[in-house]
Amino acid sequence: MESGAAPVRAVRCPGRLERRRFDVRIVAVLGAGKLGEVLLSGLLRAGWPADRLIATARRPERAQELTERYGIRVVDNETALRAADVLTIAVKPQDAGTLLEDIGPKVPGDKLVVSLCAGLPTTFFAKYLPEGTPVVRVMTNTPALVDEAMTAISAGSHATGDHLAQTEEMFRPLGRTIRVPESQQDAVTALSGSGPAYFYFLVEAMTDAGILLGLPRQVAHDLIVQSAVGSAVMLRESGEHPVKLREAVTSPAGTTINAIRELENHGVRAAFLAALEAARDRAREIASQS
Ligand SMILES: NC(=O)C1=CN([C@@H]2O[C@H](COP(=O)(O)OP(=O)(O)OC[C@H]3O[C@@H](n4cnc5c(N)ncnc54)[C@H](O)[C@@H]3O)[C@@H](O)[C@H]2O)C=CC1
Ligand SMILES: O=C(O)[C@@H]1CCC=N1
C-alpha cells in the first residue's frame, strides 16, 4: 500500500450515504471488458474518485471508450501495476496465463492481486507472482451494475484478513459480499456467478409461454419481470423458505399445482441439479487446462 492518509469520501451504502475512509487508494482493473467495466462503474457510483481508478485494455478503441465514458486513466499493464495498490485481474481465464507471463515477475511485493477469473485457483497466480504476493479470489456477478451483486471472496495462502477487508471495501458498495473457503469457489461460480443467466433464461422461457397463451410479447415480458422482482424481494425480505412461499401460491385443485406437476414431469429440478454440476465441472476443467 502507498503510505499517507487515505482521503475520506462519501460512499453509497445500501439505503444511505455515510462518510467513510477508503483504505484502498488506487485500484487497477487489468483487462477492463464486460465485468471489469461493471466493477469500475460500480466503484464510481459508490463515490470512488475517478483519479483513483485505472484500467487497461488490449484495443485502443476500448481504451478511448473507457476514458470518455468514465474519465479514468487507461494505461498499459506495466504502468498500472506500478501505480495501483490493488491489481484486479479481469481478463478471461484463458488469457490470464499470457497476461501473467508478461507482468507477473514485475509485480511489486506490496501489491494485492484480486482475481475475478472463473475457475482459476489462487495457486495458479502464485506460479507467476513474486513469492509471498497476496492473492484474493473473487466471484461476483453482473447485477453489480445495479448494486445488487452477490460477491464471494476467498483468501489465497498469503492473503490476510486485511486483504479480505480491502477486497470487501471494493465490492460491498456493489451488493452483498460473503467470505467462503477457496475450495467452494467453483460451486459459487456455478450458483451465483452464472446465476443471473439462469434467471434471464427462465424469464425468456416464461415470456414465450405467455406468447403461446396469446398475450402480446411486451405484456408477457412485463408480467414476468415484475413477478420475478416481487418474488425475489419476498424471498430476501421475508426470510421464508421458498417451499413455504410456493405453497402459499399453490391452491388446492387450483391452477398452480397443474403447472408444478408439468415442471416435475419434465424433470426441471433434475435439470437444474445437472446444469449447475456441469457449470461447476467446467470451472474445474478451466483450472486443469490452465
Ligand atoms: N461476465 C460475467 O458475468 C462474469 C465474468 N467473470 C469473470 O470475469 C472475467 C472477465 O469476463 P468478461 O468481462 O465477461 O470478459 P471480457 O472478454 O468482456 O473482458 C476481458 C477483457 O480483457 C482484455 N484483455 C485480455 N488480455 C489482456 C491483456 N493482456 N491486457 C489487457 N487487456 C486484456 C480483453 O481485450 C477484454 O476486453 C473472466 O475471467 C470471467 O471468468 C466472473 C463472474 C461473472
Ligand atoms: O460464464 C462464465 O464463464 C463466467 C463466469 C461466471 C459467469 N460468467
Image (spheres, helix red, strand yellow):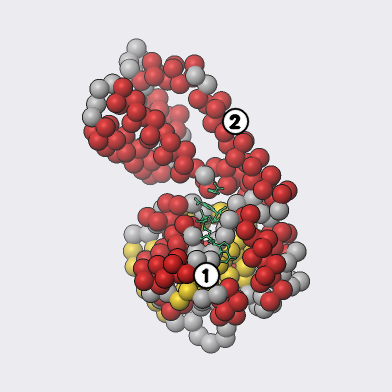
Which residue is pictured at 42% across the width and 20% down the height?
A: 260
Tell me where residue 11 sits by quadrant: bottom left
Tell me where residue 164 sits by quadrant: bottom right
Decide: few, some or many residues near mark 1? Use Cα within 10 Å; few <14, some 14-19, many ≥20.
Answer: many
- In percent of width and height, residue 87 lies at 58, 70
Label 1 near ligand 1 (CB < 8 Å): yes
Which residue is pictured at 60% across the width and 61% down the height?
A: 115
- Say if 94 sits above or below 86 in the image: above
Q: Mark 1: which secondary structure?
A: strand
| Residue holding disc 1 | 56
- In percent of width and height, residue 193 lies at 53, 48
Q: Quadrant of the N terminus?
A: bottom right
- In front: mark 1 or mark 2? 1
| Residue holding disc 2 | 274
Front residue of this view, candidates 66 and 178: 66
Tell me where residue 254 sits by quadrant: top left
- In percent of width and height, residue 268 lies at 50, 25
Which residue is pictured at 58% across the width and 31% down the height?
A: 273
- In percent of width and height, residue 264 lies at 49, 19
Which residue is pictured at 49% across the width and 16% down the height?
A: 265
Label 2 near ligand 2 (CB < 8 Å): no
- 157 vs 178, left or right, is right
Front residue of this view, candidates 210 and 18: 210
- 132 vs 252, left or right, is right
Do we see residue 64 in this rendering? yes
Q: Amino acid at mark 2?
A: Ala
For residue 160, the mark is none
- Say if 130 sits above or below 31 in the image: below
Q: Mark 2: which secondary structure?
A: helix
Q: Amino acid at mark 1?
A: Thr
